[in-house]
Amino acid sequence: MNLLTPPPATSVAKAVAEFAGHSSPVAAVAFTPDRALLVSADRDGTARVWDLGGAKPGPRGDVPRTGEPVRSLNCSPNSRLVAVAADAPGGLVRLFDITDKTPAPNTTLRGARGAVTAVAFSADGKLIAGGGDDGTLRLWEPGPTFRGDARAMLAGHTKPITAAAVAPDGQTVASGSADGTARTWTTSRIRPGPRATLPHPAAVHAVAYLPDGKSLVTACADGRVRVWDLGAAKPTVRVEFAAVVRVLAVSADVLTGTSEGAAVTNWDARTGAVLAVWEVPGGGTVAALTGDGRYLARGTAAGGVGVFRVAEKRAR
């Protein structure tokens, strides 16, 4: 960016919906990719589905309780399933079908030791990657004969995994960890395993692939976002800029990021230039972005959930 170019003016996010339905702090939120539904979960283990597609957003149904607090959520690419990861020693990730107003159990992913803090789906929905307290990234592939076990266990991190993402082509997966590294792994059925290690000076909070799958974006606790070129024999940082980010979304050449949802920023992925800044009224403890980065969901310590538009309204 030209140093003489003033930063863009801050815009105020547009509130779309406010929900009150949790009796304890909200621990996780996740949009379905079609943006029709939002799932939220609290520390008492209650997970609720909210309808965003109608003229009046509101409650749709409750996910069956498991008796365990929830650590993380993610929704499948076809918007039919939600993965609910428990914050418990058993390390279970349960899938629920949310296509009907009464969510129903689908299957359970087993094997993790401790809480699962990050779950990611492949673009075709066939592969699920998850990792957490035990530092091992697991790959599950539910199907007709699936019994819950991971088809691959990828060990290498020395501290808990904090983030995961599957490449657009499904051939590799990335993980971020409190050990100060991001790692990429091959998902091959024949020999899944490590591909590259990306060193950071502090814990890695978020990872996301650019659409071409050749670059990986990482957000680090040192207050820097880095765009790595994965095409070289040894991945190198192509772009780096200052930002405190815990949640990332990537659309074309635009990166969208936030911490706990107090502000949302858009950056040019090619240069790191700030394109837009959105101030979000109020405060929160957890946040999620839609895949295109246009909408933010935020959960609060008081059990509330808010949805905000953090983009210019599209012309009709």
Image (cartoon, rainbow, N blue to C red):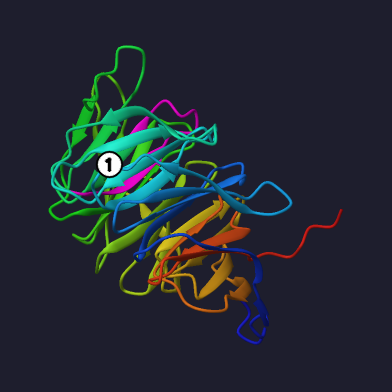
Q: What x and y, as percent, mark residue 99?
A: 54, 32
Q: In this image, 240 relative to 129: left or right?
A: right
Quadrant, the N terminus: bottom right
Residue range (magenta): 115-128
Q: Quadrant of residue 181?
A: bottom left
The magenta stretch spans residue 78: no
Please tell me which residue is depicted at 30% across the width and 59% down the height of the picture. Answer: 43
Please tell me which residue is depicted at 23% across the width and 38% down the height of the picture. Answer: 92
Q: For this rendering, which residue is in front, 225 or 316?
A: 316
Q: What x and y, as percent, mark residue 103?
A: 46, 35
Asked which secondary structure carries label 1, the reply is loop
Q: Give the labeled residue for mark 1.
A: 66
Q: Is residue 231 visible?
A: no
Compared to residue 190, the image places residue 221 above or below, namely below
Q: In this image, 27 relative to 297: left or right?
A: left
How many badges with numbers are in the image? 1
Compared to residue 44, the image places residue 99 above or below, namely above
Q: Residue furthest top?
A: 145
Say few, some or many: other residues with alpha carbon within 10 Å of mark 1 (under 14 / 14 to 19 / 20 or more): few
| Identity, as a three-letter code, of the amino acid under mark 1 | Thr
Please tell me which residue is depicted at 52% across the width and 55% down the height of the picture. Answer: 249
Q: In this image, 176 relative to 38: left or right?
A: left
